[in-house]
Structure formats: C-alpha cells, structure tokens
Amino acid sequence: MGPVSQQWGGQGGQPWGQQGQQPWGQQWSRPGAAGNPWGGGTQPGPPQWGAQQSPQQWGGQPGQSKKSGGLGKVLLIAGGLVVAAVLGLVIWNLTQPQYKNDNYQIPPATANAPELPINENPAEWDAVLTRNALYQQTVDSPVRCQMNPERLDPDGTPEQVQAYLQQEMNCLYRVWGPTLDRTGKYHTFVPTVTVYTDSITTACGTKPKEPNAFYCGADQQLYFSMDMFRHPATDTARVHPVADFIMAHEYAHLLQGRVEIAGVRYQSADQLTKSEWLTLGRRNELQADCLAGMYTAAVAQSRGYGQTEVAAITALTQQIGDDSGGRTAPGDHGTMASREYWSQLGMSTTEVAKCNTYAASPDLVR
C-alpha cells in the first residue's frame, strides 16, 4: 500500500496528517488502546445524544494524567465512555420519528463564496477562539439526509461522484445552516465540490494526483480526488460514511472560516513560535473532527448508520494521527488517540460547546 500525502485541512491545503509525511491510512491495525468501538466503558447515563459529561469528567482531570498512566490512559477511559455514548446516540436517533430542518431552504451551490468575516482586532482573538458565539448553539437532530446513489461507486464517472458529494454538501448545509443562523452573527453557504482525476491547480496552489480531499480557504471550495476510491485504506466504495466523514471534516474547516476561527490562526502566525503554531493547528484539526462527528450523529437516522459505519469512521480517525507509522515528533493535526476521542465526542453530543478544543486541556489536544 503506497503512501498518501494527505492534504485535508485548513487554508492553503494544509494536510490531515503531518505535512509531507502523513500517509493516508498507514498501518491500518487498530491501536491497542482503542478497543472495540462499540464495547468497553460504561454508558454515562441514559443513551441520549447530547450527554452532559465533559471530556474531563469522562477521562479524569487532565492534570492527573501522569499519576494515572498519562494521556493514553486518560483517552482510553474517555474513549470507552464516549463510544458507549455514541452507540446510545445512534440507537436513540434511529427511534426518533421527527426530522428537523426539513423546510430549511437550501440555496444552490456556488463557487462565488461570500466574503470571509475577518476579525482584525488582536484583543478579541482569544474570545473568537474560546468564547465564539457558535459554542452557544446546539445542532438539530435528527436531520434528513437522502443520498443517491446510496453507495459511492469506484467504477462510476467523476461526474457521478461529484453529484453524490454535492448532495452531501446540501446535507451539511441543512445541519449547519440553522446552527450558524441562530448565532445572529454568522452564516454559512453551500460550496461546490470538484472531483478530479489528475493533478489540480486551485486558488491554494497545485495538488498532485493522489488519494486526497481538501478544503481551500482561498476560494472556500472543496476538492475530492477519484484516487480516494483506489486506496485500500479509505475503502470509500465499501463504507460510504468514510467519504461522508471526510467531506464533513472539510466542511468543518469552511465553518471555522465563516465564524472567524480560522482567520485568527493565520493572522497571528507571525507572532507564534513553531510549537505554538503546531498546538493551534491541532486544536483546529481536532475541532474539525469533533464537528464532523456532530454532523454524523445528526444524519445517522436517515442514513441508517449503525455499528459498521461508526466503526469504519473510528478506524479512520485512529490511523491518520500525527503519531501513525511510529512517528514521535509533535504534529499539527493530533495523535491517533486524540483524533478518535474528539470525533467520538462529536458523535455523542448536540452541544457545539463540547467541540471547543481551544479551551480544552493540553492533554486532550496532543
């Protein structure tokens, strides 16, 4: 299995996985701490999406992690309980008869994105990151998401795949549009998805031909390579939620731009040390994982997600961390355990505040 230079992420095509090093899906054996995505742990309360437990409640106080075995033990305990909440949330959603936002108008996709809101006052940057109006919102659930075809077809044409993923953008807008509208300050839109078969030149530069998907902050559009179907790690043809989660992660970066979060990181770049830049990058990427998990939960009922689908997403997040392949140097996307933790946390809640990685303990954004 050849390496995949993963370019998922923020403005300029920042990779999901360490830049220039992270192979997509390298070493797809599950980390020992992860366990069965549907087992382990005790259900924290009734099986309801939107459980009130915080990451610290699930995994113990981060400051105590060294005494209890370090980050691995913190995330092991947290992950087991979050997984139980995810299962309960899927079951709960599958029993709910009333879809939300069915009458929410979805505009046509546009390549002419609205201008990004930029906060140019450094005195307000911390508030943008840690006390954003988005964190005061809840995501409606369940939300109807009807896709056609039901499964992505690796033998299909780029036009067919593009049509499928454009439907995905409509679903993402139906979930996130009302959420941002309720802030009274921010709004999102439906971007285009470009499916490509060769190297591609965008406003964020030229990307080579390889299994890849990315959000370009310069034009606020999404891009998806047909080579994703041909890489055994992603397996998008067999388990469509993997492709759906990838797109949800990229759309989360668009959301971060629409609520000024992404702009703060790039505006402050010249004031940050390398370590600070990497830390801010991890908080950014792990938040995108968490928001993608929230979307997954919201559409679980209409998409018929069950154990197989959530396990596939969990396996994906476990294998794309900065420490996959035995790397030890700190990266800007988060470890395998951290990515699994935040994506599952998103799948277990409807409260956007739970995805506030910018206020999270350093132990949870390694």
Image (cartoon, rainbow, N blue to C red):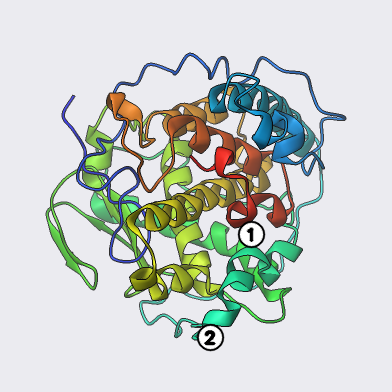
Image coordinates of residue 19 in percent, x first then y, are 25, 48
Circle 2 — which element? loop
Q: Quick check: 79 left or right of 147?
A: right
Q: Nearer the viewer, residue 219 or 285?
A: 285
Q: Quadrant of residue 306?
A: top right
Classed neighbour count for the residue bearing mark 1: other residues with Cα under 10 Å, few (<14), some (14–19), many (≥20): many
User: Is the C-beta separation of discs 1 and 2 under 8 Å?
Assistant: no
Residue name at image x 46 percent, y 84 percent:
114
With respect to residue 1, does 156 lie above or below? below
Q: Quick check: 223 left or right of 139?
A: left
Query: Do we see residue 357 in this rendering?
Result: yes
Q: Which residue is labeled 2 in the image?
A: 121
Quarter of the N terminus within the rendering: top left
Q: Quadrant of residue 232?
A: top left
Residue name at image x 28 percent, y 25 percent:
325
- The span from disc 1 to disc 2 (Cα, nearest Å) is 30 Å
Image coordinates of residue 299 in percent, x first then y, are 63, 46
Q: Nearer the viewer, residue 237 or 267?
A: 267
Residue name at image x 69 percent, y 29 percent:
59
Q: Quick check: 73 left or right of 89?
A: left
Image coordinates of residue 163 in percent, x first then y, are 38, 57
Circle 1 — which element? helix
Query: Do we see residue 178 in this rendering?
Result: no
User: Residue 175 bears which disc, if any?
Assistant: 1
Q: Amino acid at mark 2?
A: Asn
Which of labels 1 and 2 is toward the front? 2
Q: Quadrant of residue 49?
A: top right
The residue lying furthest to the right in this view is 46
Decide which of tag 1 and tag 2 comes sooner along the chain. 2
Q: Amino acid at mark 1?
A: Val
Residue name at image x 72 percent, y 18 percent:
41
Image coordinates of residue 286 in percent, x first then y, are 50, 47
